[in-house]
Amino acid sequence: MAKQVIQPKIRGFICTNAHPVGCAQSVRNQIDYVQQTIVPQKTGLNVLIIGASTGYGLASRIALATGYGMNTVGVFFEKPPDNWRTATAGYYNTVAFHQCTEQEDLKAFSINGDAFSEEIKSQTIDLIQKELGQVDLVIYSLASPRRIHPYTGVDHRAVLKPIGRPYVDKTIDLVEEQIVEIIVDPAIEQEITDTVAVMGGEDLTFWVDQLLENDCLKTGTQLLAYSYIGPEITYPVYTHGTIGRAKEDLKQKVDLVDQKLWQQIGGHAYVAVNKAVITQASAAIPVIPLYISILYKIMDAKGINENPIAQITRLFSDHIGLGQQPILDDQRLIRLDDRELRPEISQEVKRIWLEITTDSLPRLADYNRYKRGFRNLFGFEIDGVDYDQPVETDLHLP
């Protein structure tokens, strides 16, 4: 394919293209962060990452490979390039990951397909058995709006809605860039059921059962599932809404998996609660873009903000690394959102939330930071990249 100049195609919370060179630079920046923050190790351990191409899943793959010398199997669902249409950002991220790690004498395998399906589970298990034998760690970091149930064939679609009563509050109109009132009607029972089916823990249990049945987990294997809780101001539409109900189900399933792993292989399973970060998924949640714009301004000013790679590096340095025992709260959760939810941070966010308007948005929040962070997800506005230069978009996974 001939090279082309790529500019972002953004409408609201959707970006329909990605920049391969920008994505590659973003991956290199994350690798640099890890290797400058910790002393790189060569553990030779093996990790399976389910949802490995963007956000916390990608950060986990980068940190574990380049910081801890782990061999990685990454499962994800991304679109490859098609004629003049670019691939998705996660596809280019993964191409860049392979390019950056192939010189590290590490094994890296990628499977592109629907992680909810039996076909991809079988492919993954076959690959592990053939190439690695077993894995020492499993990361579950899936974020999807849809799941076709592998046994019933039912097409479940998640919704972002409150439960019980309408949600009325303020948000940013991402097109007009104004503070507006938003009203979200409550979910009906079927929508709650569907959201739990997509974003709850059932699929995780299917993965664990098949990995155990096929002897793919070493003695002492640990499993991590990523989640989010957030502050009180987002509770009605998140924690107490359909997504929160799904996260409760995930937590319950992880606790059952923990018991199963302990009984069968002496392993453990945990939920790591991460802080709010800019993702395409979170951009679609009412109030979250405004909340993050306020939160980032406060946390940046205090020097305690973290992006996914910083969070994940801290996770493995302080909780799950070699010789580490995870620090758990009274619900067995690893709380990486501890800085976000410090009382003084939450109080300041709440104060600003009550008074912010369109006119005061530039002063009280950092919406430009949010916008740039959103574009960064797709390889745009990355320092050091010349976006006026034509680039090759027809890249291929190894």
Image (cartoon, grey):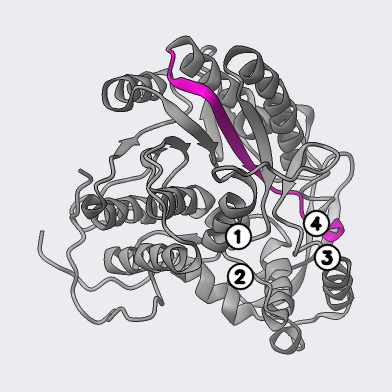
Give the CA distance from mark 2 to mark 3. 28 Å
Q: Amino acid at mark 4?
A: Thr
Q: Which residue is mark 1?
A: 283
Give the CA distance from mark 1 to mark 2. 9 Å
**What is the number of the mark on residue 174?**
2
Please state the horizontal and vertical placement of residue 172, each as a whole percent of the image.
Answer: 69, 70
Mark in front: 2 vs 3:
3
Indicate the quadrant containing the C terminus: top left, top right, bottom left or bottom right.
top left
Q: Residues within 10 Å of mark 4 (few under 14, many from 20)?
A: some
1 and 2 marks in contact (CB < 8 Å): yes
Residue closest to the eye, 95 or 260: 260
**What is the number of the mark on residue 234?**
4
| Location of residue 214 with respect to 56 vertically, above or below | above
Q: Residues within 10 Å of mark 3 (few under 14, many from 20)?
A: few
Give the CA distance from mark 1 to mark 4. 13 Å
Q: Amino acid at mark 2?
A: Leu
Give the CA distance from mark 2 to mark 4. 18 Å
Q: Is residue 284 left or right of residue 122?
A: right
Q: Is residue 369 left or right of residue 214?
A: right
| Image quadrant where residue 216 sits | top left
Indicate the quadrant containing the N terminus: top left, top right, bottom left or bottom right.
bottom left
Give the CA distance from mark 1 to mark 3. 23 Å
Q: Is residue 222 magenta?
A: yes
| Location of residue 33 with respect to 149 vertically, above or below | below
Residue numbers of the magenta segment: 215-233
Mark 3: secondary structure: loop
Earlier along the polypeptide chain: callout 1 or callout 4?
Answer: 4
Q: Which residue is mark 3?
A: 342
Q: Residues within 10 Å of mark 1 (few under 14, many from 20)?
A: many
Mark 4: secondary structure: helix
Earlier along the polypeptide chain: callout 1 or callout 3?
Answer: 1
Q: Amino acid at mark 1?
A: Ala
